Image (cartoon, rainbow, N blue to C red):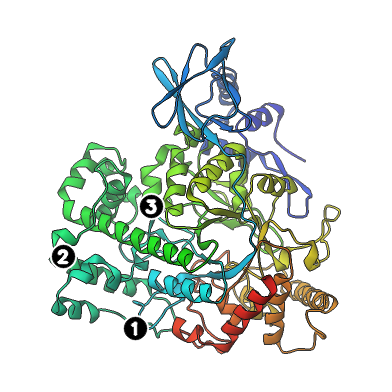
Amino acid sequence: MTDVDEDLARLAAHHGVATSYLDQLRQPLDVDRAAVVGVLAALGVDASSTSALRDALAAVDAQSPTPPVVVVRRSVGGHVAVGGPTQLRLEDGTHRAVASDGGRARLAPGLPLGWHCLELGDRELPVIVTPDRVTPRSKRGWGWMVQLYAMRSESSWGVGDIADLRTLTSWTAERGGDLVLVNPLHAVAPTTPMQPSPYSPASRRFTNPLYLRVEDTPWYAAASAKLRAEVDALRPTSDVDRIDRDSAWSARAAALQLLARDAPTLTSPALPPEDDDLWLFATWCALCEVHGNDWRQWPESLRRSDSPAVSRARRDLDDRVRFFAWLQVFADDQLAATQDEARLAGMDVGVVHDLAVGADPSGADAWMLQEALALSARIGAPPDLFNQQGQDWGMPPWHPRGLAEAGYRPLRDMLRSVLRHAGGLRIDHVLGMFRLWWIPEGAGAADGTYVTYDADALLGVIALEAERADAVVIGEDLGTVPPEVRRTLAERGVLGSSVLWFEREEVTPGEIGALQPADKWREAALASVTTHDLPTALGWLRGEHLRVRAELGLVKDVNADEITWRNERAELLALLVDSGVIDSADLPDEELAEALHRFIARTPSRYVVAAPADAVGDLRQPNVPGTVDEYPNWRLPIADSSGRALLLDEMLSDPRVIGLAEALDQAVR
């Protein structure tokens, strides 16, 4: 029984705050009043008392009918209340006449795609004209999904880097593959201890220089033999059984600083204009070295990126600011070269970059984009079958109104940065384009509620930037996802994600459907056996995740968890037999793991990807949701079933990896 009254429900509905929702089994659940009031507070709306609620509703009634930004599809156009005559200024500076009727401007179908503006006398109203959908590619393809940091080579500086990514894409292209999906390469704070999770970055717009190959920088190319020898001596080995980002970055940073000290001016890259946001990000990096990684703990005068004190600090720290700016340019050049080589080698897509769902509240994006974020809330996921206590990802969400009032430019700039050197984009938790699970300050992961977003506008911006970058878009649409979300994504040309464990038939709410046969899977999707948040193929077949989850206290009933797994394992193997992928379920686990991949290759899914870790029999999943340091999340190099760490050089000559690549290529083509 809900304790949300009618007035609170009306206020919540206006601000997109859910008072009830359907869980993973499509059963209705009511949201507690405290969660609704807490989330409204995070949106800047006070509903904590009767009088505050009354004032908030009055503010809703007095709201202007003119929105802060207008997003229309090119083929449809639209109308907007403007209150007077206006004209449309296109992004190229030219103007178009706009018909007006009764104070409503008509944006006719067929306008040029782009970021335009309605001129309303003393103010301007941003207008974004978007494609109806992301332009699809018809060619079917296969490839790898990788955690780049774990793909270390003999030449790596302790962490898999962009040069290793280039090696893998070239190897894949030679064998007929069309894409390599890589974990987010987003920037983290530049001082130790370094954030291990690629899904909790400091900034989603900039790149982590930890992935730079030092030897591929212009500074190294121009260095003397003596200086190169000094730099080479700093390179750490890659034979340890844990990814040590702190030592890897310390060595890499020391090498780059040595090179920067002696780098001739002419070999330094051309830096962007002084008003580019790169300079502000580089200033944040330099300030982290002085004041620590959390801007919320800095002196008060530095906590606003647009403050006079920050401008002074930028000048005072000019050498360090320029150093960090150069590192971003180097990373951008190396990533662009990797994508260019992939396409020249025949890859239809090339590198697909992963976009994390949010950024660390202590990081650069939160510092630079405070008005566009709800900094007093955290995003996560409600309890579901795999995570029974819910998930708290610890990152602030976009503020729906704040993002719109910024004209969606923060989203545009982020997309452009990632797509600048990509053939595709994977959007982690694409449900966030429709709604996000907000957790109020002081609440637990299960004690939140959903906040809705203008999905048509957000997907339109994504389609526009993908169109301009000639990129495919893949949405991670797993978990508690309403069916209408998947329909909308398909209509807008955004591919979904089909994971073997989750592809089940639609059934009555409250029940779990049977596993889907291969021919019933979606065509407009990227198919995989597993993901970075789930057990590896061999780990799942052997029940390794049961042991880990029980030891970490992540399940309420260990025995029930094992019974469920045994039933699901038997069901899956029966499906493999029935579909003719294997003749009998009585096979070694390693052969069954390969059979799982041959099964997904039989689906009609547009793209089929496998993890190299699954090819070599790694038992350990990269990340266990619900943990931070209790499990070595994001710190595990790829290893074989005995736990022996493998380098990229060894993997690419491993018969199991070669065999899986050949099997995927043959099945997909």
Residue 123, relative to residue 625: is it above or below? above
Q: Residue shown at 64%/69% (left/top)?
A: 530
Element at label 2: loop
581, above or below 280, in the image: below
Name the residue rendered at 37%, 65% in the picture: 194
Q: Specify the amino acid type for callout 1.
A: Thr
Give the side of residue 590 with respect to residue 204, left or right: right
First-in-chain label (2 vs 3): 2
On residue 263, the disc is 2
Label disc, if present, on residue 237 of the rendered structure: 1
Q: Foreground mark, 2 or 1?
A: 2
Amino acid type, mark 2: Ala
Which residue, given by chain and number where applicable, does mark 3 sit on?
A: 363
* Residue 553 percent coordinates (x, y): 62, 70
| Residue kind at label 3, given as amino acid type | Gly
Characterize the local packing of mark 2: few (<14), some (14-19) or many (20 or more) Cα atoms within 10 angstroms.
some
Mark 1 or 3, nearer chain start:
1
